[in-house]
Amino acid sequence: MKLAEYREAIAAFDDNRRRCFYETLAHNLTVCARTIWSDEQLSDAEKVDQMKWLNEIQHRVTGKVGASEPWPDREFFDGVLQARTDECPPLRGHVGWAVKQSYEYASAERPAV
């Protein structure tokens, strides 16, 4: 799926699944930061640039999770995920992976607790 398709799928989640998605996304973006940091093929300058933009995305994700007012998923996906990966194209693969994994986790059926 493309980012826009995930955006629509997440918007269709109930509140609990949507929150699960964004909490898992924050975790998966941390995994991405570690992947960038340990990539020996990247120069230090490339690592810093990618991690700078990734940190901005992480900041917005945690802000969305804790926001007292609803932040529409379309606005978040377009204004944060798409915009930041446009600023730093090398992040597209990392962010795409994090979104996909988070979507799969949040959409999985789990027994009620």
Image: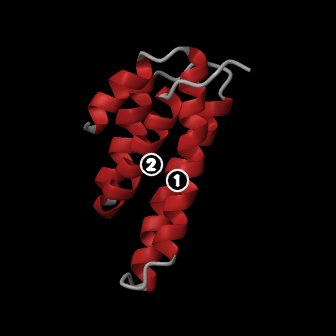
Please tell me which residue is depicted at 25% across the width and 38% down the height of the picture: 2
* In-front residue for pair 70/113: 113
Question: Quadrant location of residue 4?
Answer: top left
**Residue underneath mark 1:** 29
Question: Which circle's residue, 1 or 2, is located before the other in the chain?
Answer: 1
Q: Where does the C terminus fall, quadrant-wise? A: top right
Residue 6 lies left or right of residue 70; in this view the side is left
Question: In the picture shown, does residue 103 fall above or below 82?
Answer: above
Residue 34 lies left or right of residue 43; in this view the side is right
What's the amino acid at mark 1? Answer: Leu
Q: Are marks 1 and 2 in contact (CB under 8 Å)?
A: yes
Helix, strand or loop status at disc 1: helix
Please tell me which residue is depicted at 32% across the width and 54% down the height of the picture: 92
The Cα–Cα distance between marks 1 and 2, rounded to whole angstroms, is 6 Å
What's the amino acid at mark 2? Answer: Ala
Percent position of residue 13, x then y:
47, 18
- Disc 1 crowd rating (10 Å Cα; few below 14, some 14-19, many 20+) is many
**Residue underneath mark 2:** 98
* In-front residue for pair 41/85: 41
